[in-house]
């Protein structure tokens, strides 16, 4: 009954506006009534419709609290998601270490499942975070695809900066070598999310997901390759000492290094060798798992925030009962 009365007031208000503006105004006002009705705020919905009916044309009444809430919700989602990814990586590492402690004394293959287990747990946590972010993105501020991509990447960069600053206080000698790869990943992630947002805005959701995921994988792979190439030579330098293999990594297997970091596997190929896998994972161990944690939610938000808002069904005109 309250919704029907609000619809009557809305129709009375829109009739005072020029004909070319009525359809757009009805859609906006119907959407607001739909939100208030969904929250059970019947009296506020009725007050909103009454204020529209009482206001003069050219000065529509807007509930300022709605955009403010959307802005705060957007900030919460984008600022809290990267620390959640860091937490997912840490928790997954703790679970992995506990599982290894249990399996290490019982089975011979315990060491071989460490990285796959860590990556699998992190990927699961990342997928769960992506579901939560997708739901939240429906009620966040909608901007252009580029602004959305930057809004996703910049908080990740802020989180990375805080983590690196914390590690720097502990005299992590390998910290400077991690920065170029992380910067490259962030730089390449922006166009990947931008392209996904453009496609999602045009209604091509599946293609948007494909472009976003593929672009994010390319960004992560390039970051891992840069970190390895800048730290480990590609050809033997000097004679081999004591029969040990040289500390080199053949560049021919570079496209597989990201997946090697996740699985500790060469996928049946001759390269990278077991020693090369050890060198790669010794050089870049945490970063690829962090990329894995961030990718699902980053792509999910870029796609969900860019998709057109669902049209709200117009409130039907009340049918007068016969006398």
Image (tube, grey):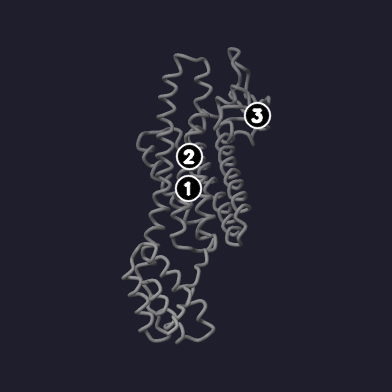
Residue found farthest to the top: 242
Residue shown at the point (43%, 31%) measured from the top left:
93
Image location (x, y in percent) of residue 69: 36, 63
Q: Residues within 10 Å of mark 3 (few under 14, many from 20)?
A: some
Of mark 2 and mark 1, the one earlier in the sequence is: 1
Q: Secondary structure at mark 3?
A: loop
* Residue topped by disc 2: 290
Tell me, yes or no, whether the two marked residues, 2 and 1, touch with CB atoms within 8 Å.
no
Looking at the image, is 170 positioned above or below residue 77?
above
Can you identify the residue that label 3 sits on?
Answer: 250
Give whichever of 79, 162 is nearer the camera. 79
293 vs 265, left or right, is left
Q: Position of residue 273 (x, y in %)?
A: 63, 23
Q: Which residue is mark 1?
A: 131
Q: Are marks 1 and 3 in contact (CB under 8 Å)?
A: no
Please rate how many residues cluster around mark 1, counting C-alpha atoms within 10 Å: few if below 14, some from 14 to 19, many from 20: some
Residue 80 image offset from top left, x and y in percent: 39, 49
In space, the residues marked 1 and 3 are separated at their CA atoms by 39 Å
Residue nearer the viewer, 35 or 136? 35
Q: Quadrant of the C terminus?
A: bottom left
Front: mark 2 or 1? 1
Cα distance between the residues tagged 2 and 3? 25 Å
Residue 210: which disc?
Answer: none
Whichever of labels 2 and 3 marks the residue nearer the N terminus, that label is 3
Find numbered disc 1 in the image and state the secondary structure of the residue it sits on: helix
Q: Residue at x 54, y 83 (%)?
A: 20
What is the distance, in whole Å, between disc 2 and disc 1 at their CAs? 18 Å
Q: Nearer the viewer, residue 19 or 89?
A: 19
Mark 2 surroundings: few (<14), some (14-19) or many (≥20) residues within 10 A: many
**Above or below: residue 94 compared with residue 129:** above
């Amino acid at each position: 009954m309250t919704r029907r009365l609000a619809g009557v007031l809305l129709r009375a208000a829109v009739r005072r506006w020029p004909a070319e503006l009525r359809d757009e105004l009805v859609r906006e006002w119907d959407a607001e009534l739909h939100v208030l009705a969904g929250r059970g705020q019947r009296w506020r919905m009725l007050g909103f419709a009454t204020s529209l009916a009482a206001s003069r044309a050219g000065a529509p009444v807007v509930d300022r609290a709605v955009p403010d809430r959307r802005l705060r919700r957007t900030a919460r989602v984008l600022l809290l998601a990267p620390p959640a990814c860091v937490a997912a990586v840490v928790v997954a590492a703790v679970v992995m270490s506990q599982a290894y402690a249990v399996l290490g004394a019982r089975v011979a293959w315990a060491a071989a499942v460490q990285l796959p287990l860590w990556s699998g747990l992190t990927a699961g946590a990342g997928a769960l975070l992506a579901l939560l972010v997708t739901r939240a993105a429906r009620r966040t501020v909608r901007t252009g695809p580029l602004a959305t991509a930057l809004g996703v990447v910049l908080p990740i960069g802020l989180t990375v900066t805080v983590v690196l600053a914390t590690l720097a206080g502990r005299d992590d000698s390998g910290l400077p070598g991690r920065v170029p790869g992380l910067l490259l990943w962030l730089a390449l992630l922006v166009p990947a999310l931008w392209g996904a947002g453009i496609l999602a805005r045009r209604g091509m959701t599946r293609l948007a997901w494909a472009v976003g995921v593929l672009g994010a994988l390319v960004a992560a792979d390039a970051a891992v390759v840069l970190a390895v190439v800048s730290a480990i030579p590609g050809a033997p330098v000097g004679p081999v000492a004591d029969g040990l293999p040289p500390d080199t990594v053949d560049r021919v297997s570079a496209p597989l290094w990201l997946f090697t970091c996740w699985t500790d596997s060469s996928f049946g190929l001759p390269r990278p060798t077991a020693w090369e896998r050890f060198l790669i994972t010794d050089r870049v161990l945490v970063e690829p798992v962090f990329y894995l944690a961030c990718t699902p939610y980053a792509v999910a938000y870029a796609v969900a925030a860019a998709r057109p808002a669902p049209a709200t069904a117009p409130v039907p005109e009340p049918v007068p009962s016969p006398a």
